[in-house]
Each structure stands twice: as structure tokens, then as C-alpha cells.
Amino acid sequence: MHGPVRVAILGHTAQFGGVELALVRLMGTLATRSDVQARVILFAHGPLVTRLRECGHEVEVLPLDEGIGGTTRYQAAGAATAATSAVRSAPFVMRLARRLRELEVDVVHTTTLKTHLLGIPAARLARRPLVWHVRDRIAPDYLPAPVVRLVRQVATRGPQRVITNSRATAATLPGARGLAVAHPGLTPDQIASEPRPRPALPVVGIVGRISPTKGQLEFVRAAARIAQAHPEARFRIIGSPMFGHEEHEAQIRREIERLGLTNRVELTGFSDDPALEFDAMTVAVHASPTPEPYGQVVAEAMARGVPVIATDAGGVPEIAGDGPAPVGWLVPPGDVDALAAAMDSALADADEAERRGRAGWERARTALGIGPSTDTIVGVWQEVAGRERPRVAIAHDYLTQRGGAERVVLAMLKTFPDATIHTTLYDPEGTFPEFRDADVRVSPLNRIGVLRRNHRVALPFLPFASSRLRIDADVVIASSSGWAHGFPTTGRKLVYCHAPARWLYQSQRYLGRDPRRSPIGLALLALRSPLKAWDRRAAATGDVYLANSHVVRERIDGAYGIDAEVLPPPFAVDSTGDREPVPEVAQWDGFHLVVSRLMPYKNVHRIIEAFSGLPERLVVVGAGPMLEELQAAAPPNVAVVTRLTDAQMRWVYANSRALVAASHEDFGLTPLEAGAFGKPTLALRAGGYLDTIAEGVNGTFFDEPTAASIRESVIAARAAEWDPHAVRDHVEAFSPERFALRLQAAAARLAE
């Protein structure tokens, strides 16, 4: 395997703007990866240098003549200025090329129009491949026409690859070489643990550098139209002028005075903490009259749970367009009347604004993270440096059911979208429908319908099927609770262990009875010795083990003598979508909730027994071998329901008082699902619940999986008060973004 790709990232300014803040985020993410060594070369001194160094990143300054560095895109459009700049920049290009050779970088990566153009001769003189990262729409409505013609022409043969920040930007570069799209992602610290509370007084804000393309004038004029209808509203413009736009700021101030808004509109200047600014807003406005290349501030506002009003053009619809729920209001660019009408709607209907803000937050935390975009950028670097991207494959025991392990596989696939999935059995009707869009490869056993529909019957054949499922990939990520860790591979193997096989190492707990008292148990006893031998040989083929909880880490050590790193599985649930009452319990006003497979070791029968005779009601949601038995045993205050839709699941979580969980879980995902709705959990003090529950914060424990112990916990919880905000905060530690970043880093280390 090859070592890390060495990359020099070039920026022409050290003042903070959207590009520069995105660079800080990218460098922070790259620092977690072992397949890249990135350093920054800036063409001027400024606060960005200090910020990068404080974060521990390698950065140096190679000063560019101020006359060139300060030239605006409009000044550069003139033929005389362009010619003069080319001559004056020649010595700088020579110094830059020499420095690139000294650093022995593999790739040169440019981030702005100036660095794109200066990077071409410098990279060629240094004999290094060049990648442009284009964050401006190369169009006449955004840039001077001569600049558009020049950049479009050069893009077809100057850089080896071009990365754009949106599909809208890519569309303005016809013929550019090797176009790839990497949306600027949000880091976990940018995404609120929950939508921030609505401010007491209405505040409408706009964030961005002061520029005619950012819409501050349109914002002020729209504010004037609604100021009388909302006399308590205040308006804030956060940002400062750059690139010679000081006169535009003066024009904005004059317009505020002309419209009589001096005491209503505040220009705050630049803020290096946009999250703090957004948290103080009732609604965030993006008013660019010219289509934006992406619209980073829209994503940042959504990440804080702030409802947004944004222009329906450029890259913005890629962030805030059609989805399961509206995240704000989209208006035509430059339409002051439409902008004012949207402001009025957001201020007049607080409940609707809050719903849209929460929907935006949900989309930001599940779809706008930085991991996928970083992976795209690194992949381009590896390609132009002559490095083959590691081929990643995913292995899983069997895809025949809808459970936590299968959700983890979907998260793995989202992290590595080009990966193939290899499994012994695949039943599209029995598992999550998202797998139908994946490249799923199966063993010959899958041809036998009875095995495909009931994987437990296939147990005697699975060692043979698993041993013959050879996977040709550089890195195989094996999602295993018994079989996938044994799939042979041509490359390295990263085992993500949900648990060593329960039916081998915890047979009685798995079956809920003495194994000698059931046909399946007797079969397991007969096969235990050869299966354990196979299982330990399979475990020895793993290069790295990850455990989904600390208790599973201990079990891995006990079963195989392997020290595993703990990586909690990802958690994401859409708590903002539609909710549909469950007919059987729609009339119940509050209830405790169980969400579980209905198998003996889950101890659902003990929970039902505990609630018998209590005034509290209980709803059990699940399916499994014990369904009919539990339905028959349920007292009047207990309902056992099955096959709920997503909308119905949201309804039961939202209307519950607390979740009850009494099984010996390897991880314990359902407390996090409940926590997304601000609901606490009463759980058995054991297993993975020790990882997902912080006592007194998002739940409490009982000590035994008995009816008496569970009953005592329910009674004791009557007097407890829970902070829904603290409950949701705890859930964020298990975000999909954090899982993806750590999984990518682990795979990258193996691929070295």
C-alpha cells in the first residue's frame, strides 16, 4: 500500500471569509486521517494564519505583491491590469514553484480564483498535478465576462481535476477536466445538539461579507416593508466588506437612514462565531440577488435549527430544496416583495417557523456533514497523485431482517457509497428497502427460499457458505455478530463486531432457556465444539477489531483474546417527520414504551408482567417468535402492536413518557431513539445500556431483569423530572457524522 498523499493547499488571503472558514474545517477533518498530509501556503499574513497554527496545522506564508493580491475581480477584467499583473506575478510564481519542489508535495490544491490562475504556471514549473477547488459560479451574472471566458477556457486544460462546491457551480464550467462535486460539509461542532430555543424577541438576521452579491440592500428594503406590521422585530446584518466593497457598506447605511430604520437595523461587523449569531435569530435570511455557488450560511443556519428564508437559485436548492418536510421559505432572487412576504410569514406563525427550523436541523445533521465531501476531495487527490483509491467492500452476516446491525450496514454504505455488500442470505422483503439500490452479492445458499426467509434454519450450513464467500477488495469492513468476520478476503479486514456469536457464547440467554430443552438448543450443543473452532479461526483473520460497546469489547477479549477499540454505532432518527397515531392506543394519554424484537432474551415478558396491576399503561412495539404469546398474556393496560410505519413509530415515541428496556444488549440503540424525542429510559444496569445511558441525564437503571425490579423502577420514576434538552444533548455523542469520520480513519490506516 502507498503512504499518505502530500498536498499543498494554496490560499491568496488570510482574512476570514467563507472559503477561509471552509479551509479551517477541512484541515480539521484531514487531521483525523492517515492517508493525507496537508499543509497550507497562504499569500498574505492575517488572522487565518493564527487560527490554523492554533489548531496545530502546518501553514506558511509566501507573500504576494500587495498590488496583485488586492486586485479585485472587476479590476482584473481590464486588459491593461491583467497584463501588468501577469508580469508582476512572475517572480512570485517562480518562488512558489521552488517551494513546492522543496516540500516534495504530490498535489497542489487551489481554493480561489487568484490561486487557480497563479497555480497553473507554478504547478507546471514544479511538475506537480494541480486540482482546482472552485467555489465561485463562473458565470457573467457573478463575475466579469472577460474573467468568465478566461477561467472557462483555462479550466479545460490547466488543472488535472476540478472540484466544485455544488452542481450549480459545476454547470458553469462546461468542458472542465474531471469535474467532481463536494458540498462544503458541516463539522459536528457546528451542528447543535438540538434546535436552539426561539429568542424572546423576534430577530431577523443575515450573515455574510458585505457585497452587492450578498443581498444586504434587498434585506434592508424587505425589512422596511414589514417593520410596521412587526414593530417588535429587530434586524441584524452580520459581516464586513472585503475586496474593495467598503462603498457598498456605506450605501447600505444610507439606505437604512433613508427608510427610517436606524433604530431597527444593526450592522454588527464580522463575527468569527456564526453559530452564536444564528442562535440569537428568530429567522435567518439569505438574500443574494445573484445565484450563490452554494450558500454555506443556509446550511449553518439549518444546523442550529433556525428557519431560513433563502433565494431559490444556484446551489441553495441543493441544501434547502425538496425534502420530507420544508426547512424554510425559498424566494426568487432579487424579489424584495417575496422576501418581505416570507419574513412576515416566519414572524407571524411561530409554530410553523419552529417546525421548519427543526426540519432543517434534522436535514443538516443527517445529510450535510463534512465526511462525504472530504472523502471526495481526498479521492481526487489520490487519483491525480497516481494513487489508486482503496477498494472498500462491506460484509454482513445476512440481510434478512430490520435491526440495529442492518442500520449500521446502511451507515457504512453511506460512508463508502461505492462499496459492494457481501452476505450469506438476502431477503429484500425482510430487510430495509434501501439495500435494493446497493450492489449486494450473496452465497449460493440464497437460492433456497426457506433459508432466505429463516436464517436460523441455515445455521449448520453457514460456516461452509461463509468460508467460500471470497471478497476481492483492498479493505473489507465486516459487520459481524457471528459470520461475516470469517469471509475470506484478498485485502485487509476491519471487523466491526456487534457481539461474538450469542448462540455460541451465551446460548442460554439467547434461547431464554436451558439449551437442552429445545431442538434448536440441542443442535447448538452438538455443533458448539466445531463452530467455536471455526469462529476463533475466523476471528484470527481480522486485522483490526472494533467493538460497538465496552461490554462487547470485554466479550471479544474473552472469546478471542483480541483488544478492540470501541466505536459506538451511529444513531439518527427523523424526529420531525409526520406522525400517525396507532389505532390500538390512540386514545391513551401517555404510556411507557418498549421497542424490541420479541425473543426470550429481550425479557419483554418480564416488563409486561411488571406492569400488570399498575395504573401506568405500556405499549410494546415489536415482532418475533413470542408475538402471539405476549399478545395473549397482555393485561388490559398493555398493548402489543407490530409492523408500525415510520410515522407511527414517531408518534409512539413522541407520546410516550419513558422507554423501558430489560434485555442484555450489546449496545442499546433504543434509548437513543427515545432520546431524540426528549424521552428518558428505564433500563437494566448491564450491557450496552451502560454506554448509551447517563444516569440522571437520559435515564435510570434497575438491577435485575425481573418483574419486581422493573416495577420498582417504574414506581420510583413517577416523581422524577427530566430535562428534554439534556436528554437530546446526550444523544448527539452518537451522531452518524462522528461514526463516519472514525470509520473512514480506521479504513484509511488499514489501506496504507
Image: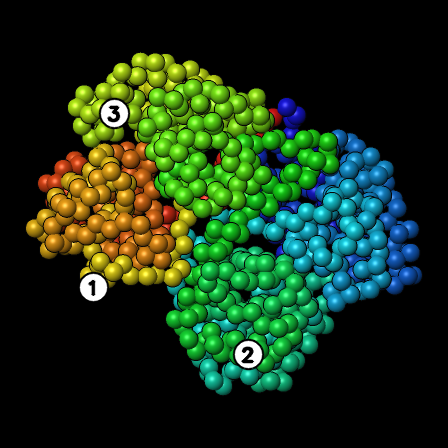
| Label 2: element kind | helix
Nearer to the camera, 162 or 214: 162
Q: Residue at x 20, y 25 (%)?
A: 518
Q: Nearer the viewer, mark 2 or mark 1?
A: 1
User: Against 404, is 76 above or below?
Assistant: below
Q: Residue at x 34, y 61 (%)?
A: 579
Quadrant of the rendered image containing residue 371: top right
Nearer to the camera, 693 or 644: 644
For label 1, the residue is 587
Nearer to the camera, 745 or 85: 745
Location of the N terminus by quadrant is top right
| Tag of residue 520 | 3
**Residue 333, percent across and down?**
64, 72
In the image, what residue type sits under mark 3? Ile
First in sequence, mark 3 or 2: give its number. 2
**Residue 575, percent across and down?**
38, 56
| Tag of residue 643 | none
First in sequence, mark 3 or 1: give its number. 3
| Label 1: element kind | loop
In the image, what residue type sits under mark 2? Ala
Q: Residue at x 34, y 13 (%)?
A: 530
Is residue 276 visible in the rendered image? The answer is: no
Q: Is residue 221 left or right of residue 600?
A: right
In the image, what residue type sits under mark 1? Gln
For label 2, the residue is 340
| Label 3: element kind | helix
Mark 1 crowdedness (10 Å alpha carbons): few <14, some 14-19, many ≥20: few
User: Against 719, is 548 above or below?
Assistant: above
**Residue 690, percent across and down?**
29, 37
Q: CA distance from mark 2 to mark 1?
A: 42 Å
